[in-house]
Image (cartoon, coloured by chain):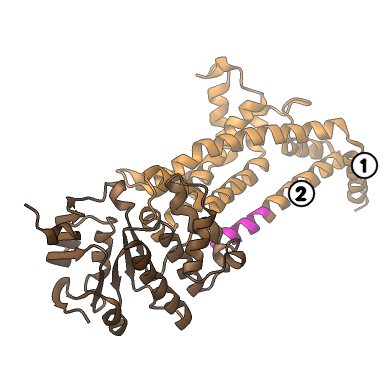
Amino acid sequence: MDFILEGLIQAFGLLISGHDETYSAIRATVSASTLSIVACLILGAPLGFLLGHSGFPGKKAIRTIVDTLLSFPTVVIGLLVYAFLTHRGPLGGLGLLFTLPGIAIGQTILGLPIVVAMTATAVENLDRRLKHTLLTLGAGSKQVLLTTLWEARFSLLLAAVAAYGRIVSEVGISMMIGGNIKWHTRTITTAIALETAKGEFSMGIALGIVLMAIAFMVNLSLIGLRKRADQ
Amino acid sequence: MTSHREEKLQYRLEGIRQDYGKHPVLAVDFLGIEQKSIMGVTGHNGSGKSTLLRILAFLESPAQGRVFFEGRLSTTHEERIRRKVTLLTQEPYLLKRTVRANVAYGLRVRGERNNSDRIQEAMDMVGLKPQRFASRSWHELSGGEAQRVALAARLILKPDVLLLDEPTASLDLESAERIRKASLAARKEWGTTLVIVSHHTDWLESVCDKIIVLEKGRVRSPLPSA
């Protein structure tokens, strides 16, 4: 038990002293996850709106595929993206393997189905009276679209927060695409895995505390947003 | 040649048929509604009253028939016409915003942003003090207050036509009275044509120029004015 307590004390020391290696992993995590969540929202929100708002042939099939992708294993995504980004792969020339943007591509694939599925559900669940209300108050089609998205804003934020929670805590993609390169692509989760394997608990615990803090904030936001979305 | 009487018609409905699936819900051969008049519509549940109002509000196109508005054949696609008409339902939807933003929405989509005086005027008409209610959120309102906000959001538009679908059905006495007075004030102030769907025949008889009874989608008896 002593080594855990010792590790915890040292972990706080690392965080307070601004230990370079620890903060490098935090910076890498924040950079990759920010890139990927922005991409998820830019691509996922319009797709989800289309899926929830419109009727078109094949909609059910697309919805089933999106729902299936919600449980896509991170190592499989890592394998697929690796195959595309490796120098023998079709996108090998872009030089994205073992880079943070490369990790972000994999994480975008991980988060995208969450944003699409939750946005579609949010739009489907909007009150049916909304459209008639907007029309009878004189809104045109563009104003109906924009106001509808604004009415679903808390549910859209909920989708973003849920996707971010999954992205920031994954390890498979970061390990396979990023390669866990020190000072470069080593993220919080890959660093924890490595330091624990080396028996260096203090840095693992320090990074674990940061990850837990992020997860806690994400969950707090989820609770608040759910309340607003249900009102 | 159009007769003088026809020129004064706000609406002329000809051969209107509406079906939901295999069920016919409305079959009106002819219906004229005069400008600046108050027409009452009554009838049992499922008699087609709400469908008629949605067609008059240009929210729904009839399966058959023609709707003339101010003498012109009109459809749901004409935003200019739709903006002259507004509908208030029994359980209106309020946007997830403040009371002020809800009341001002219709003006905002028309590009009118400087509208404090009109917000105040509309809220006064429905008996909501702007100082007390304007900043409240949509979820901080009672049923009666929400209905009054929804009516203010329509009155601020000074509509040519105000369609009311059971506007006082689930309200307390005070709110119901406010809604009734404010609706009638719209006709007095701006000459708004009113079409009121209600089961309260006493009220309809006391305010309407004409009352029609719908039965299984058909106009059974245009009652004489009270």
- Report how far apart the C-alphas of labels 1 and 2 lie in the structure: 17 Å
Q: Residue at x 22, y 55 (%)?
A: B61
Asked which secondary structure carries label 2, the reply is helix
Q: In this view, does B80 lie to the left or right of B210?
A: right
- Chain in orange, by letter, is A
Q: Give the range drawn in magenta.
A: A221-230
Q: Determine if marks 1 and 2 fall on one subunit.
A: yes
In depth, the one of A5 and B32 nearer the eye is B32
Image vertical order of residue B188 relative to residue A77, above or below: below
Residue position marked by numbered label 1 in the rendering: A13
Q: Is the magenta stretch mostly helix, strand or loop?
A: helix
Q: Which residue is drawn at 50% across and 40% down?
A: A44
Instruction: Identify the disc placed on residue A141.
Output: none
Q: Earlier in the sequence, mark 1 or mark 2?
A: 1
Q: Position of residue B152 (x, y in %)?
A: 45, 64
In depth, the one of A175 and A53 nearer the eye is A53
- Evaluate whether residue B102 shows in this view: no
Report the chain holding disc 1.
A
Amino acid carrying label 1: it is Gly
- Chain in brown, by letter, is B
Instruction: Identify the disc placed on residue A213.
Output: 2
Magenta segment: does it hold A98? Answer: no
Q: Quadrant of residue B130?
A: bottom right
